Image (cartoon, rainbow, N blue to C red):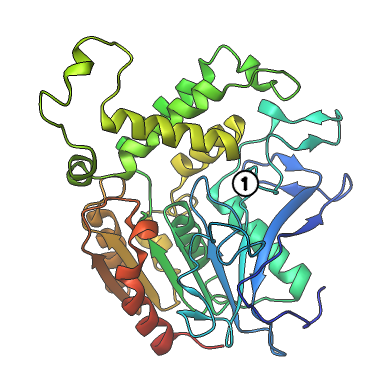
Amino acid sequence: MGDLTGVLYTGLVTKQAYAFGSDDAPFVLENKQTLPRIEIAYETYGVLNAARDNCVLVTHGITGSSHAAGKYAESNRTVGFWDNFIGAGKVFDTDRFFVVCMNSLGGCRGTTGPASMNPVTGKPYGLSFPIVTIRDMVRVQERVLRELWGVTNLALVAGGSMGGMQALEWGVLYPDRVGAIVPIATSGRVSARAIAFNEIARRAILLDPHFQKGNYYDKENKPDGGLALARMVGTVTYLNDHILEEMFGRKSAVEESALEHDLHARFDVERYLHDEGAALVKRFDANSYLYMTKAVDLHDISRGFTDMASAVRRITAPTLLVSISSDDLFPPEQMERVRDLLMGAGGDVRYFCMESAYGHDAFLVESGKMEATLRNFVTDRVGG
């Protein structure tokens, strides 16, 4: 168990790792398969108090990582995905809270996943890696918090998209151990439409000639084309039609004349999609993309319960649900269903539909639009 020492968060952060498990005490997944050893990459911001009750867990999206705020070095050009929310005086005030973000199980940013070494074979897991669920990710987070810092009760869990699914699962799995939850741009159960797009993305990877049944780690050529195409498919679902038109709308016929003579000449939106695909290839693993999208598809907080209402009734923590008005991937009505079930169960729930034309990605790109709502909720409902 970790002690209470910590470094005041000043904008610089270090990625750290914690490992648990053994052949004699493997981690049992929801599907009863096991992992003998799990390593988790994490980052912390702020200091844990003596009572160990000021911990805020931030959870990330499908291709995200533990890098939620700050920089690794002053020379870095970019900051963590929620840097505007984490720090002294910010929504998750590091003078008050001990903020933790972990890379999710099955990922490839420092946490055990398909690219990790299988201790049994001495080779990367590849497709022998077991299927993991959002619930498995949450159970791993709970174990790390308990073993590493002795944190059994969280002040708050917040996250968007896949991270929002984890926040909901925290409320369902550990109703007496989480002070508040903030699921953002997500749902209680993934829709058929979202699953359909994820399957198209997975198929792009599986059909890449360099995929090699997932055993490509020692090969010169990786399934980069398939992964890039998968990201292109995902990107279309993250943006609303209005913002696509605003950013990449058609130009005049004169400006587009080159397109009439060159099959490979690209519209602005095509260039953007190719850039997004190329960027993901540099930082993500194709097998992890398969497993993370499958975990998202399997998300259903009612699994193991009679129905969703029964699962939602377990949530006793004050809850702030945030949806995005233009989100085509997780439309507002999906969050409103959870809100209605919580209200029907007498829960302490607030709902905020953020007006944005940006689509699903607004929870990152235009996160400032929900800052006041988040700050008010934290002030009113969160201890620590």
Looking at the picture, how far across and down is residue 193, in whole percent? 30, 36
Q: Residue furthest front?
A: 254
Vertical position of residue 178 compared to residue 220: above or below: below
**Residue at position x 52%, y 72% from top?**
175
**What kind of element bears circle 1?**
loop
**Residue at position x 40%, y 29% from top?**
274
**Residue at position x 77%, y 68% from top?**
147
**Residue where numbered disc 1 is placed:** 30
Q: Residue furthest left?
A: 253
Residue type marked 1: Glu
Looking at the picture, how far across and down is residue 85, in whole percent? 46, 73
Classify 10 Å Cα crowding around label 1: few (below 14), some (14-19), many (20 and above). some
Looking at the picture, how far across and down is residue 272, in whole percent? 35, 35
Looking at the picture, how far across and down is residue 292, in whole percent? 54, 40
Q: Nearer the viewer, residue 247 or 208?
A: 247
Res 239 → quadrant: top left
